[in-house]
Amino acid sequence: MAGADMTLLAIDDISKNFGKHQALCDISLAIESGEFVSLLGPSGCGKTTLLRLIAGFLRADRGTISIAGEDVTGLPPHRRPLNTVFQNYALFPHLTVADNVAYGPRRTGAGKAEASRRAQEALDLVGLGEFGDRYPRQMSGGQQQRVALARAIVNRPKLLLLDEPLSALDLQLRKRMQIELKQLQEKIGIAFVFVTHDQEEAMAMSDRIAVMNAGRIEQVGTGAEIYRRPATRFVAEFIGEASLLPVQRTGNGALTIVPAVEASGRSVAVLRPEHAQIFAGQADASTSCNLLSMEGHVETVASIGGVTNIYVRALGHLVHARRLGLVESGLREGQKVVLGIDPQNLHLLEGPQP
Amino acid sequence: MKYSTVLLTTSLPAIFVFAPLAAAQPQSLTVAWYGGNWGDAFQSCVATPFTEATGIAVVPDIGTSTTTLSKLQQQAGAPVIDVAYMDGGISELAEEAGVLADIDIESIPNAANLADAATYRNGDKVYAVGNGYYSLGMTYNTDEISEAPASWDALWDEHYAGAVTIPSPSNSAGIPFIFFLNQIMGDTPDDMSATIERLRELDAALFFDSSGAASNAFQSGEVILGAHFNVGAWALIDSGLPIGFTVPEEGVWATDARLHIVEGTQNGDAALQFIDTALGAEAGLCLAERLYVGPAVTNVDLTEEVSRKLPWGETGSIDDLMLFDWNEVNARRSDLTETWNREVVR
Amino acid sequence: MTASRSVILGLVALPLVYFTAFFLVPLMTVFVASLTDAQQGGMTFSNYARILLDEYHWSVIAVTFRLGILTTLICIVLGYPLAWYLVRIVKWRTWRRICVILLVLPLFTSNIVRSFGWMVLLGRNGLVNETLQAGGLIERPIRFLGTETGILIGLVYILLPFVVLTIGNALAKVDHSLEQASADLGASSASTFWHVTFPLSIPGVVSGSIIVFALAVSAYVTPALLSGGRVTVLAVLVFQQYSSVFNFHYGGALAITLLVFTLLMIAIASLVSRLGAR
């Protein structure tokens, strides 16, 4: 039964209520061995609740959770073959770094010498081999994060749960830790379930991302999939930036964009800002064939470092366009422009949208 | 030096409280007395009639005898207290400390009726006058003991073993009571070893520090026989408990609450007037009725009901009271306390 | 500038004056008295020699500290589960508040009243003996009053709230995620308690113990009432000297001896607990 690429973690129809509040509703998710999966969503979407259900700190109202084929739904946390990196690291303040890391082996039957050998290995792996004698409070946030990581992997679990582990770090350190964490994950081959509300972080690290909203999984897929082909309006708006445009098919099957006043009940297409082209006039737009064109005027121009965001009002829609580099001369607020969109770059959301 | 603690903690509030009162009232007299029923009785039996007669307000300064002595010592030279009630024993210590004025006994009309024993002299100086005797008599549980014990020997009766009580040296009556037992056993104060030996043999439930502890033990039945103050015993009896109070054939030890005028007071005349009121027959009657203290003046007419509750018992008189020279008792406090600790307390 | 500086100076001076007036001066007064000869008035260590070179005083010190240590141990053993119940088991906040109020309420009544209450309960005909006799556990009443057991019961009852409050406070401060981390790393509930929760609640246990111990060895009212004058502790000796013998020199030396021994015990205990934590 144990195939190499068999499902490691299987979550089936999990629901969880807190009083009248439905925190999770019919969640199903399967994670392969060695896979890096992010649970991504805004705060309150249920991602942390799901993580705590997997870890065993919460009990589901309905549904089952299996790890490596074993049903763990009813098992207490200490009997589940997984480990967790907590958001605040949860390092034991009364133990040294070495004892913190050796805690897992000690509690699961390793002798003192064996436990400290394994702890040293784990600390070496995260680059803190020299720091075993210190207490957590004597270390920086980044170092504490690594200790938490070392402590969580020392028992070599098949599955590691990480609850926003980088959120307390400053931007620079966070970027560096993202890379290190990903490299470590690949090196030790443990499956990661990584909770984050930072879509860039999820995009940069994950094999797959489960986008969650209001207690449901909206979409599961690779970063590219959910960016290019968002399944829902929520995913389109939450992942990257997007202009949502109501569209209609003409008789010959071609798409046209419907003015805002007639938007109700139409299908909706997602337009990423890098796909919106801006021309000075209709004549320029016509030079490329098959472009959908709309006349409009520039409402806002905002340069942020290497990127310029341009918001154009056309057919009553506010369309977001983006150019690399500083804005070229001539593009100023109030100016009349023509927007050009390649229909191939429009991703149509399934079903009628509100 | 040793009283500067008390000075800091007690004289500050005293200044704050009494300064405005003194300013509002052109003439007032500060009198130190005890708390509880004693203070209440002094207020209604002496202070209120005094104020009615003279128009001079009385400002009470409440504390035990010991506390009052401490205050007098720290206020020496500029006293706030004019008149002080203190018990026998402390009274002698106060005189020794030099904080008491000579009481001009001739100018107190009611002092004419004062018993000789109740005028306390140091040479020619009168430093205190008695204002009522109380005694440490035999108190017993009438449910357990049908007949009033005739002798203090009953304390050693094996029927009552483990259920008797006497005062400990921490109680003001503790050391004098040892003197008392010593005397009724026929020993001299120079050698108390036989008395100490008998105390060692006493199977006591309790050596009480406070009168309240003794009352509590009698009330709960923990103690069925023992020495207790007549004031406390009668309070129990009056509340309907099966308690009896008796004066055995050997008599009882007694002492008194005394009045003193503080050295250096600015209100000497008012102080004498206050003492005159306190020594009056009406005040004596009132105190006897309320506290069952035996009057130190001879002209008090008591009802039978009150007189049987007095310190000398139903049939006795002031002659049944055994009064010791407190100076002798005080001189032995330290070594008897130590002997008690080492020999009697097991 | 000068005004604000004088305000700051005043703010600093006020507590300093308060501390000096109400703590330092009284303590120094007692200390100086203890070093003064009762008769001649010069400086002397004779008051201390009288205490420390005397077997009797050592036996009193032994009784005092035996009661203090036993009271502290029993308070911890009883108080820890109680604190646990209040902080970890009780989910209904109103009930928890009621429990805390019930626990703290006796502290607002007089120590004397509560000790008198125990005198009645522990007496020969008291509720405790009657219950034991009715239950057939004993034939004759057990003597509690006038014994160290009686004093111990009274002290534990009076001092228990301090331990429950300090331990409860420490338990409430233990971060739940630490216990979850422990469980996550494979520790059972019992193992988590011994390796995480209990070590982290030790500060509460230590401060509770110090409070209880200091109050137990210096207690006068409870030992005086429940001992019936038949068990002597240092506080009783001190009280005798101050209340009836009026020897403030010897009494002061007794008080300072009690203070020094108490501080020594606390220092030893905290040293041991610090070494134990390593």
Image (cartoon, coloured by chain):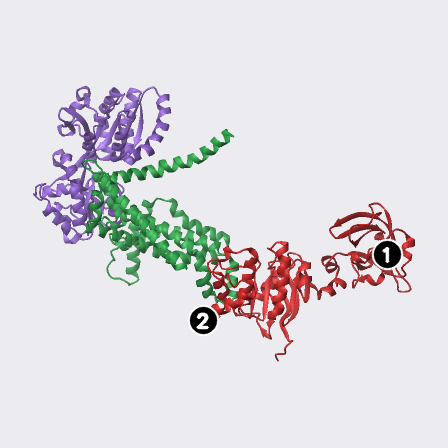
Q: For the residue labelled by badge 2, is the local secondary structure a helix, a strand or a loop?
A: loop
Where residue B25 sits: x, y (%)?
A: 35, 21
- Mark 1 Cα-neighbour bin, 10 Å: few <14, some 14–19, many ≥20: many
Residue shown at the point (45%, 65%) measured from the top left: C190
In the rendered image of the structure, the colour used to display chain B is purple
Where residue C139 sits: x, y (%)?
A: 24, 61
- As drawn, the label of residue B41 is none
Q: Is residue A153 left or right of residue C71?
A: right
Q: Are marks 1 and 2 on the same chain?
A: yes
Q: Disc 1 designates what residue?
A: A340
In the rendered image of the structure, the colour used to display chain A is red
> On what subunit does the disc labeled 2 rest?
A
- Mark 2 Cα-neighbour bin, 10 Å: few <14, some 14–19, many ≥20: few
Height in image: A224 above or below B43? below
The picture quadrant where one finds residue A243 is bottom right
Height in image: B169 above or below B258? below
- As drawn, the label of residue A111 is 2
Q: Which chain is green?
A: C
Separation of residues labelled 1 and 2 (CA atoms): 69 Å
Q: Amino acid at mark 2?
A: Gly
Q: Amino acid at mark 1?
A: Gly
Residue shown at the point (25%, 58%) measured from the top left: C142
Where residue B52 sits: x, y (%)?
A: 30, 22
Q: Is residue A11 left or right of residue C138?
A: right
